[in-house]
Amino acid sequence: MSTVALIQLKAVTKMYGAGATALQALKGVDLSIEAGDFVAIMGPSGSGKSTAMNTLGCLDTPTTGEYLFNGVHVETLGRDQRALLRRRYLGFVFQGFNLLARTSAQENVELPLLYRGESAKMRHAAAKKALASVGLSGWEHHTPAELSGGQQQRVAIARAIVTEPAVLLADEPTGNLDTQRSHEIMHLLWQLNVEHGITVLMVTHEADMAAYAKRIVHFVDGVVDSDTLNPHPKGMQAVQIAPSTQLRTEPGNTPAEVTHVA
Ligand code: ADP
């Protein structure tokens, strides 16, 4: 029995510019991602990783080819419809955290809900819950300047999951962090994937961080060069060897599971 993949790229190409200066960033990418997967996207600089992530994140459209999100042809959607799909189903985490500087962790996390028009009461409760699920209970009223890089990335992850997305897209989420914080963030992403059912797509240059993923997709020169399953994801080993108590959440204090879209 075959299941419909949550995400499918079929022969996707992306051309930037035209004429003599035209550059083909993607040259026919085929990629199929099931709900619940945890994919690390790797490859040398200029190989098309960001272009692929922008496409997967509905921020950009392919020049040719198809992008199906839960069976919906994204390449045929207009800008507003893509924005809706993004707001409803996708969460984003960036290397540079992208938090509002003079705004508390709580308010940063509430922002996507404010854009959605949710009530203040709902926003407060959901943001508090999301911050708790990334291990930041008690830090709600701190501004980014009062938090470490690892804590800022946790706030950014809380902001990304507060809308209960089906998919979390993370672009080098550990790129600005030291090794210890990087592993903590990866462990958190692993928990969101395994315990909360969020599909995670992550670009990384670091093999140590990619080792947390269930699958590693390698881009070279605008195509998928290799696509391999990781038989022993690192998060799984960490739990078997040394269970983390730091991020344990209380029953009923976790984001609702979103494993598929309507
Ligand atoms: P990676 O993320 O693997 O470093 P990118 O997807 O950023 O690769 O880039 C792939 C290729 O497309 C590169 O040659 C890059 O210079 C080019 N490129 C990316 N974005 C643009 C753009 N907006 N305009 C023109 N060329 C671009």
Image (cartoon, rainbow, N blue to C red):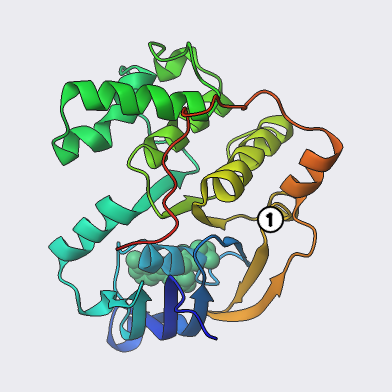
Residue at 56% over, 20% down = 148
Residue at 28% over, 76% down = 72
Estimate how packed mark 1 is, as few (under 14), some (14 to 19) or many (20 or more) residues with alpha carbons within 10 Å: many
Residue at 43% over, 72% down = 7
In the rendered image, residue 101, in percent from the top left (x then y), is placed at 34, 22
**Quadrant assignment, res 130:** top left
Q: Nearer the viewer, residue 99 or 120?
A: 120
Extreme residue toward the right, this view:
241
Q: Nearer the viewer, residue 169 or 116?
A: 116
In the rendered image, residue 139, in percent from the top left (x then y), is placed at 46, 13
Q: Is residue 90 left or right of residue 31?
A: left
Q: Quadrant of ligand 1?
A: bottom left
Question: How many marks can you see?
Answer: 1
In the rendered image, residue 92, in percent from the top left (x then y), is placed at 40, 48
Task: Tell me the quadrant of the picture where the N terminus can be found.
Answer: bottom right
Q: Is residue 174 visible?
A: no
User: In the rendered structure, which amino acid carries the disc numbered 1?
Assistant: Ala
Element class at badge 1: helix
In the rendered image, residue 216, in percent from the top left (x then y), is placed at 66, 66
Q: Is residue 108 left or right of residue 53?
A: left
Vertical position of residue 189 compared to residue 79: above or below = above
Q: Is residue 184 visible?
A: yes
Identify residue for label 1. 210
Q: Nearer the viewer, residue 226 or 191?
A: 191
Q: Is residue 118 left or right of residue 7?
A: left
Task: Tell me the quadrant of the picture where the C terminus can be found.
Answer: bottom left
Vertical position of residue 11 compared to residue 101: above or below = below
**Quadrant assignment, res 188:** top right
